[in-house]
Amino acid sequence: MPRIEAADGTALYVKDWGQGRPVVLIHGWPLNADSWEHQALHLARAGHRVIAYDRRGFGRSEQPWEGYNYDTLSDDLAAVIDGLALQDAAIVGFSMGGGEVARYMSRHQGRGVRKAALLGSIAPYLMGEGGATPEILQGMQAAIVKDRPEFLKGFFKNFYGQGLISGVSEGVLHWSLHMALLASPQATIACIDAWQEDFRPDMAAFQVPTLVIHGDKDAIVPIEPTGRTAARMIPQAKYIEYDGAPHGFLATHAERATQDLLDFLS
């Protein structure tokens, strides 16, 4: 698999599968590109070129001490798109990855992008009414400093709605924890600060067809200030709300999410 060098020299690990129109998948926190496994496999089989990369500080990418803000992270996305000479691409962001999509559309004028997707995304404003608070985020950071493995173990139960909604297998829980623990502690903590970013000014830059999907039982990224608001703010948005779905619907509702993405990209 190739490595792309970001503007500040950070090496980003990139998976590049299949042939056809490119689709760039940007993962959520605290996972890495492998979390797209179900969608990436089926997209590639359906005739798409699927690119998924590990965010700086996560997975197999380098672990710089700094750069965990959305201007830098969107520049990393630009480095992947430019480094692979992608044209006529779709960019798909899950959770935190939706912020990269939003900032890329404004900061880089959506260069090379024909379609966009925000899946369980924090954009446009996680801190809006009914969303997260600084105290919640600070509490998460303190828990990570104290015992990162134990915090993440509990976090994924909420992430997948375990025992409350649909849930996932024990294998997926273990796999998710393994992915999360590959990240640097600094990246894991610093990215939480970035979640306070206000992407409402970026929404006007979405001048391409955009898919927005959100679960209405999302306990990690509340739906009202994010998914529902994004759908209202983006003129060409196609909005799909998953009844009873938790944040991690890419796994709990894997087949449906994959089919909705395939339908949108076709």
Image (cartoon, rainbow, N blue to C red):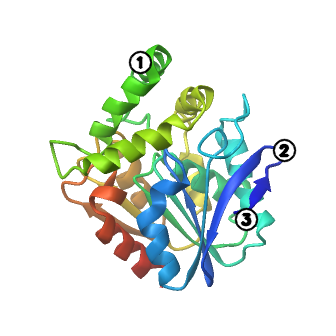
Answer above or below: position of 51 versus 167.
below
Answer above or below: position of 185 versus 31.
above
Q: Position of residue 76 (x, y in %)?
A: 72, 51
Front residue of 220 and 35: 35
Distance, label 3 to label 2, CA atoms, is 16 Å
Q: Position of residue 258 (x, y in %)?
A: 38, 71
Q: Which of the numbered marks, if any, corresponds to residue 9?
A: 2
Q: Position of residue 55 (x, y in %)?
A: 62, 47
Looking at the picture, which amino acid does disc 2 mark? Gly
Residue 104, quarter of the rendered image: bottom right
Q: Crowding near pointer 2: few (<14 within 10 Å), some, many (20+)?
A: few
Front residue of 74 and 49: 49
SS at mark 2?
Answer: loop
Residue 18, quarter of the rendered image: bottom right
| 115 left or right, relative to 262 | right
User: How many numbered circles does the render carry?
Assistant: 3
Asked if residue 236 can be seen in this view, the reply is no
Q: Residue furthest left?
A: 164
SS at mark 3?
Answer: helix
Front residue of 265 and 151: 151
Looking at the picture, which amino acid does disc 1 mark? Gly
Distance, label 1 to label 2, CA atoms, is 32 Å
Asked if residue 26 can be seen in this view, the reply is yes
Residue mark closest to the camera, 1 vs 2: 2
Looking at the picture, which amino acid does disc 3 mark? Ile
- Reading the image, the residue beneath label 1 is 139
Answer above or below: position of 104 versus 157.
below
Residue 114, quarter of the rendered image: bottom right
Tell me which residue sits at (59%, 48%) in the image.
201
Q: Which of the numbered marks, if any, corresponds to residue 81?
A: 3
